[in-house]
Image (cartoon, helix red, strand yellow):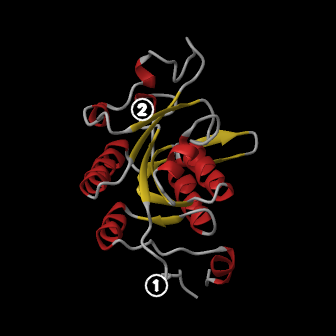
Amino acid sequence: MNDRDEPGRTAPRRALVLVDVQNEYARLPLRIRYPRLRDCLERIERVLDAAESAGLPVVCVQHAGPPGGAIFAPGGKGFELCPSIERRRTPQWKCVVKHHGSIYAGTDLAAWLREQSVDTVTLVGFMVNNCVLASAAWGETIGLATEVLSDAVGAINLRNRAGKADARTVHTTLMALLHSNWAAVATADDWCRALARREPLPRSNLVVSAMAPF
């Protein structure tokens, strides 16, 4: 059994969401480990080029921690967007500041997307093991289809009392998990091709994923 191309589905009404593409992920302790940060940023810019050329709404989300805190403190360097993204910010972007993992929690983003007639949200940015995952799962509860671009989202190494996993393992596992239910997962290049053709990305589900040869 294969992923479903859903040929009868109408063209997605997409919005591109840049999730927490902030300086905090270029330095310890949250430095992106896989894929490399610079590679992620290059692909995010490529996707942004395609989205803007196609006239898609663009959303820029920044995470804010407590004022004066160690990470994501508003007004601090870590809170700022990565320079390559900050240079491209335009007044047309929808800018959102969040305080939770999901891009929808405590923000007006879901309502704004409905006003724009968006039915499909494309997520790029950081981190896949936190805010991207939380946002994709939340999207299901509010009727939004989610796309995650695998080579334009990054992960970190994790180790705690429950176990440990290097960033590559975290990333690979979460791509499979997301594609099994909460999102259509594809590369940046595949997404750009689907956008040009006004086509949805192939999706999977839990049954197809469970029955695939292992």
> Exactly how many numbered labels are in the figure?
2
Q: Position of residue 194 (x, y in %)?
A: 35, 70
Q: Callout 2 environment at 10 Å: few (<14), some (14 to 19), or many (20+)?
A: many
Which disc number belongs to residue 7?
1
Image quarter of the C terminus: bottom right
Q: Position of residue 145 (x, y in %)?
A: 55, 62
Mark nearer the viewer, 1 or 2: 1
Which disc number belongs to residue 132?
none
> Quick one: label 1 or label 2, which is nearer the N terminus?
1
Which amino acid type is marked by label 1?
A: Pro
Q: Residue at x 59, y 54 (%)?
A: 136
Question: How far separated are the C-alphas under marks 1 and 2?
Answer: 37 Å
Q: Residue at x 25, y 32 (%)?
A: 87
Which disc number belongs to residue 22?
2
* Secondary element type, mark 2: loop
| Image-quadrant location for residue 11 | bottom left
Q: Residue furthest top?
A: 68
